[in-house]
Image: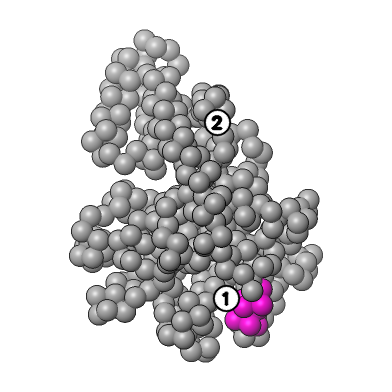
């Protein structure tokens, strides 16, 4: 098996999430943390119940402070290197639930500067345009415009730079090399970059003049930034940022790596894909845990644990009962591979149909959400 590698720019191999918790020094989400969340939210989001959000930093502290009447702010983001794909939506869907459950502010950073620096073929004009395209996917999820703040870095840099500089001053090149894998060939813009992504951890405190802890829902690939932010926070007089990490929506092609556009677009499902395209991609690329022949499948059953259509349904089918029935029927051989794919196609297309309608409406609403210098 290919050795797993997880960095903010690349995820390869089959990720063992328990190993990653140890390597990154984060904590597993325990039943007692879930209980504390439930005290405030009444119900748990299915992504918490299913372990899609599996790891954290200081979530227990965030919850304790919240029960003492201290509000936190949510922070997450997007690197606009292309259209939004379904993997990106995982933390964002969860953020929407968090905002509703805890009634908190939400900050969304779109890193047109980062993607310009790290992607050879993209111009700043392109990444900035993509930033506002990607922002539509956030607005489409129904966030509260009074409590949601979206910005593209190059249009908000005056504010960010002042927070980033004191961070940058406290991080050496050798730390950046160790944490992010930078080399002598990495451009110098990237050496400053982690201080900018970390700056938003403290933005809510700066804007409100109060000490507001941020909670960052994101896949675990982004965690290295929070190590830097947490390291410098006490030195700058800010609360240490907290994080809650999700696992990766796998590639349709199989459990190696994550759903990503780096390997090409053919097996990636974008929020802008039409019904036919979704159907074609899933039918052609979704790795099947079915048997070679119909007869064998009926007799021995399929393997949902390696079947990407089933795995994807664990991310998108909210109804536990429905999901369990699909699992059991597939395992017993009652449900065929093609039928399972058809269930996923329907699920994704139903979600996207509504999302695309909301995305159209979002074009008008967008200005209400945008922060600019
Ligand atoms: P980006 O654009 O690579 O990813 C955006 C968000 O999507 C998550 N993600 C995934 N989650 C589940 N399954 C996948 N296959 C998958 N692929 C990506 C990422 O973890 C991320 O949460 N540098 C950042 C932008 C950024 C940011 C942040 C992200 C700035 N500040 C704070 C998270 C939190 C980036 O390029 O993300």
Residue at the location (62% across, 63% down)? 152
Magenta-colored span: 157-165
Percent position of residue 202, x then y: 51, 78
* Residue at far top of view: 295
Local packing at callout 2 (Cα closer than 10 Å; few below 14, some 14-19, many 20+) is some
Q: Residue at x 30, y 52 (%)?
A: 45
Percent across and percent down for residue 211 are 42, 84
| Magenta stretch contains residue 161 | yes
| Residue 370 relative to residue 338: left or right | right
Asked if the beta carbon under badge 2 is closer than 8 A to the nearest atom of ligand 1, the reply is: no
Specify the quadrant of the image occupied by residue 111: bottom right
Label 1 to label 2: alpha-carbon separation: 37 Å
Q: In the image, is residue 77 above or below residue 236?
A: above
Considering the whole magenta stretch, tell me its main secondary structure. Answer: helix
> Which colour style is shown?
one colour
Residue 199 image label: 1
Quadrant of the rendered image containing residue 8: bottom right
Q: Position of residue 2 (x, y in %)?
A: 57, 45
Circle 2 residue: 274
Q: Give coordinates of residue 322: x percent, y percent.
A: 27, 33
- Using the image as rendered, state which of residue 366 and residue 106 is in the foreground: 366
Query: Can residue 136 be spotted in the picture?
Result: no
**Residue 211 or 252: which is nearer the viewer?**
211
């Amino acid at each position: 098996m290919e050795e797993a590698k997880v960095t903010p720019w690349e995820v390869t191999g089959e990720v063992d999430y328990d190993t990653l918790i140890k390597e990154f020094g984060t904590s597993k989400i325990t039943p007692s943390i879930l209980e504390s969340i439930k005290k405030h939210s009444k119900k748990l989001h299915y992504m918490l119940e299913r372990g899609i959000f599996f790891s954290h930093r200081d979530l227990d502290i965030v919850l304790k402070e919240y029960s003492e009447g201290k509000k936190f702010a949510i922070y997450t983001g997007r690197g606009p290197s292309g259209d939004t794909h379904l993997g990106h939506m995982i933390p964002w869907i969860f953020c929407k639930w968090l905002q509703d459950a805890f009634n908190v502010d939400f900050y969304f950073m779109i890193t047109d500067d980062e993607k310009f620096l790290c992607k050879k073929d993209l111009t700043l004009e392109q990444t900035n345009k993509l930033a506002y395209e990607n922002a539509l996917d956030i607005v489409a999820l129904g966030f509260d415009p009074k409590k949601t703040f979206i910005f593209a870095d190059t249009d908000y840099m005056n504010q960010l730079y002042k927070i980033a500089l004191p961070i940058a001053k406290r991080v050496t090149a050798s730390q950046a090399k160790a944490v992010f894998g930078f080399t002598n060939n990495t451009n110098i813009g990237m050496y400053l970059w982690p201080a900018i992504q970390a700056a938003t951890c403290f933005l809510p405190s700066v804007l409100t003049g109060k000490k507001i802890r941020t909670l960052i829902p994101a896949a675990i690939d982004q965690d290295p930034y929070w190590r830097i932010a947490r390291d410098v926070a006490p030195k700058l007089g800010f609360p240490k940022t907290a994080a809650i990490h999700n696992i990766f929506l796998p590639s349709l092609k199989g459990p190696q790596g994550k759903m990503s556009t780096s390997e090409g677009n053919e097996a990636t499902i974008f929020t802008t894909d039409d019904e036919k395209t979704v159907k074609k991609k899933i039918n052609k690329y979704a790795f099947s845990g079915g048997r070679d022949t119909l007869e064998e499948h009926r007799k021995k059953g399929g393997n949902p644990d390696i079947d990407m259509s089933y795995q994807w349904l664990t991310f998108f089918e909210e109804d536990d009962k429905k999901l369990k029935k699909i699992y059991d029927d597939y395992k017993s051989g009652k449900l065929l591979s093609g039928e399972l794919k058809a269930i996923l196609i329907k699920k994704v297309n139903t979600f996207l149909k509504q999302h695309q309608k909301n995305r159209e409406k979002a074009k008008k609403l967008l200005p209400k959400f945008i922060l600019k210098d």
